[in-house]
Image (cartoon, grey):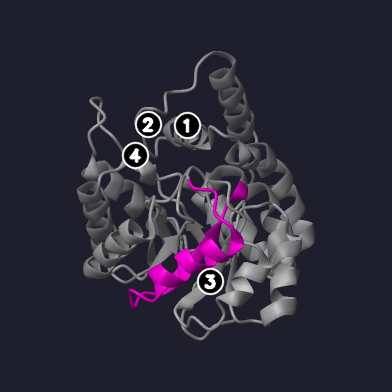
Amino acid sequence: MSAAVHWQGVFPAVTTQFREDHSLDIEATARVMAALIRDGVSGLIICGTVGENTSLSRSEKAQIMEAAVAVAAGRVPVICGVAEFTSAFAIETAREAERARVDGIMLMPALVYSSKPFESAAHFRTVATAIDLPVMVYNNPPVYKNDITPDILASLADCENIVCFKDSSGDTRRFIDTRKRVGDRFVLFAGLDDVVVESVAMGAAGWVSGMSNAFPREGETLFRLAQAGRMAELMPLYEWFMPLLHLDARPDLVQCIKLCEHLVGRGSWRTRPPRLALQGEDKAQVERVMAEALAHRPLLPDVGLPALL
């Protein structure tokens, strides 16, 4: 593991809260962050996919960065997503994150353009060398159409501030392949909720989680049980959680996660267009999954989480 950062545990991909007119509700967003920290999560990811990064203006992203740093107050790391169309735009956003004093950035491939491997590597290197912040490389080929393979990652091993790899491909073999190439050069993070236990078994030190927005204590407990190898206690929790975790793998994951968050009173279901609220059977299905989960919400084993006041 890189000595440059000590990122581990559950980092919810925090939702961005909007008012009825779809304007940014920074106060509600700050309350969501504060509640997650209160419940014992290990870090925050802001302005990620679940945070509707690409629906935000530059000034709105800056407001969210500043709010997150203020709310966290050094208690947990704050990592900001950077998702832009060009390397130059990504550098501008990354430098804004530096000014806001976040703890690192989660850098996505250049959006829209389907790049060749050497272009993907060049994008990550160009942005990383323009800033001093630690960088988490974010791989999500189903969504962003660019696959950051272990070979590409290995080609970036000499870039000192690229310190972490988040994989949302669902292929946990990637973690083994990466270690075979570069050892423990990068901190490894799970990025897809419904393979988190398998990812921990393959060496993931952290989890960027969608559904932990709605169930942060369950998420952190699951992760810590997996790290400790407490399988007998882990499996009933994982089986209870799995229908919810599957929602993170859908194209409409943001709407699903926000609806779940709304149903447990942690945030609003409201998304910014072009994302629209779930309707019909899609909404009913999520509501059924939530009703079943809440009716059988398990008692959690002790993993050292702070007591709720």
First along the sequence among labels 2 and 3 = 3
What amino acid type is highlighted by mark number 3? Cys
Question: In terms of image quadrants, where is residue 271?
Answer: top left
In this view of the protein, which residue sits in the foreground, 62 or 241? 62
Residue found farthest to the top: 280
- Disc 4 vs disc 2: Cβ atoms closer than 8 Å? yes
First along the sequence among labels 4 and 2 = 4
In this view of the protein, which residue sits in the foreground, 114 or 173? 114
Q: CA distance from mark 1 to mark 3?
A: 27 Å
First along the sequence among labels 4 and 3 = 4
Query: Residue 233 in the image: x percent, y percent?
Result: 74, 57
Of the two numbered discs 4 and 2 in the rendering, the one whose residue sits closer to the viewer:
4
Considering the numbered disc 4 on the image, is that residue within a helix, a strand or a loop?
A: helix
Q: Which mark is residue 255?
A: 1
Q: Which residue is mark 3?
A: 164
What amino acid type is highlighted by mark number 4? Ser
Q: CA distance from mark 4 to mark 3?
A: 25 Å
Asked if residue 204 shows in the view, the reply is no
Q: CA distance from mark 4 to mark 1?
A: 14 Å
- Disc 2 vs disc 3: Cβ atoms closer than 8 Å? no
What amino acid type is highlighted by mark number 2? Thr
What residue sits 37% from the left and 43% below the top? 54
Q: CA distance from mark 4 to mark 2?
A: 9 Å
Considering the numbered disc 2 on the image, is that residue within a helix, a strand or a loop?
A: loop
Q: Which mark is residue 55?
A: 4
